[in-house]
Image: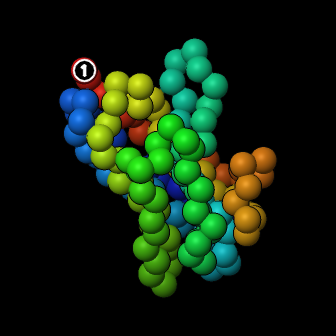
Amino acid sequence: QVQLAESGGGSVQAGGSLRLSCVASGSTTSRYCMGWFRQAPGKERERVAAMWTGGGNIHYADSVKGRFAISISQDDAKNTLYLQMNSLRPEDTSMYYCAAWRSWACAARDPVDYWGKGTLVTISS
């Protein structure tokens, strides 16, 4: 079992930056994929970025390539996933969710095993 807790959301103006964090605790000794998803009201959920906790297999949605960067830090007990978001746009406004799933390739079609509760990002023009 993996527990995920996001933080770092907030409100910024267009062109600004935010960094989201997600602490994963529980059964984190094995390698798996982690990623960020977002969903705005009335829109489908979109996978923003994903990576394998062993490093590599990094994927980005076309809408965020060149602006967002996913990374991970690891200590003995837990993984912390980050999403650095730069050059933010009003269309990036959404609830952002951290996710984890048992996979190596981190393919877009992989089912997600664990979800965080989300953190809200609001970008004003």
Q: Which residue is mark 1?
A: 125
The residue sitting at 70% across, 60% down in the picture is 106
Q: Is residue 24 shown above or below 8?
A: below
Near mark 1 (Cα within 10 A), the count class, few <14, some 14-19 or many ≥20, is: few
Q: Eyeballing the image, is 10 above or below 5?
A: above
Amino acid type assigned to the residue bearing label 1 in the image: Ser
Q: Could one spot residue 86 in this view of the protein?
A: yes
Q: Decide if residue 15 is on the left or right side of residue 52.
A: left
Residue positioned 58% across, 72% down in the render: 56
Q: Position of residue 116 (x, y in %)?
A: 54, 47
The quarter holding residue 90 reads top left
Give the image quarter of residue 82.
bottom left
Q: Looking at the image, is 59 positioned above or below residue 103? A: above
Left/right placement of residue 106 relative to residue 124 reads right
Identify the residue at horizontal 52%, vertical 63% (top origin): 24
Q: Is residue 116 visible?
A: no
Between 98 and 70, which is closer to the camera in this rendering?
A: 70
